[in-house]
Image (cartoon, helix red, strand yellow):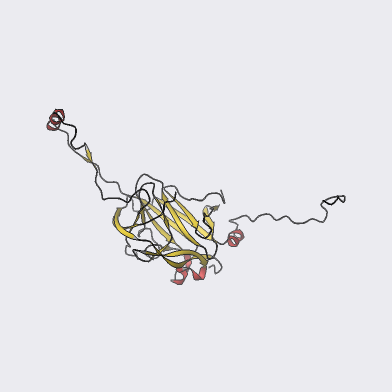
Amino acid sequence: MNWKTITSAIVLCGSAGVAGAVGNLADVTVYDRAQGRTLPVYQYEGRHYVVGKPGNEYQIRVRNRSGVDVLAVMSVDGVNVVSGETANWSQTGYVLGRYQGFDVKGWRKSMERTAAFFFTEHENSYAARSGRPNHVGVIGVAVFRKKPEPEVFIQRDRLSDSRREAPGAGNGAGASAESGAPRAALDGSAATLPAPAPQTAEKSTSLGTGHGRSEASRVTYTSFERATRHPEEVIAIHYDTYSNLVATGVIRAPQIARPTPFPGQFVPDPR
């Protein structure tokens, strides 16, 4: 599968309640832009959760942990963050060079702008307002490796051997050749994402992601071929308010010291 892709200017990313990143082939974290911190991840019944604060803008940080290019197809509330389609991992996403990371700050609106992610009430989420309320409250990243380029070799023969022994030999072509299109810089100055592909044929008090202010985010096209039809890793991070996560048992509420009528036997002196 050959993909036409987009290159984006990005920022490098450099037990319950402790971990911040989720994933193996790629790291995924949720960064609260209002609080200026990476949200801690709570693990509960095999799922990962973060606490969102209504009104706060956030961004999704993805970092490629491998030595090959990867494609990250990303969704928020069941919606592809680039194309706006109901999410499917066969769709478009961001391509990262080896060990490269970037921040996705919003819904892609054009080759130059995004609309900021922010935590909001379920009914005010972009997914609910566009008629897709059933998967509000989860961030997804499907990760694909790039199909490796075939190795190209030069046949060794007697003529090449004789040339190698001649004066000045050794400065010619090597024994192998590298092929492939130019790639994004590994310093984080650019990341890439495939162009949109054709779409294949309730709690009211819970948290969702809104369609916020417009921000600059310039992108260009590149190409990417997946090594496999199915993703090598699917990362999911659920989110909700603190009170809802406490109510569902994801977060253990702090123990509150309650007064007792008989804590001692005698009257102590005052301090």
Q: Is residue 139 left or right of residue 262?
A: left
Q: Position of residue 41 (x, y in %)?
A: 53, 53
Q: Please identify the quarter of the rendering in which residue 67 is found.
A: top left
Q: Is residue 257 left or right of residue 48?
A: right
Counting every numbered tag in the picture gives: 0
Q: Position of residue 162 (x, y in %)?
A: 13, 29
Up-down: is 130 above or below 82?
Answer: below
> What residue appears at the point 60 percent right and 62 percent down from the top-left corner?
243
> Looking at the image, can residue 176 be seen?
yes
The one nearer the camera, 18 or 220, is: 220
Up-down: is 179 above or below 195?
Answer: above
The one nearer the camera, 248 or 92, is: 92
> What residue appears at the point 51 percent right and 51 percent down from the top-left corner?
20
Quarter of the image containing the N terminus? Answer: bottom left
Question: Which residue ends up furthest to the right in the rendered image?
Answer: 266
Q: Position of residue 257 (x, y in %)?
A: 73, 55
Q: Position of residue 125 (x, y in %)?
A: 48, 68
The one nearer the camera, 104 or 228, is: 104
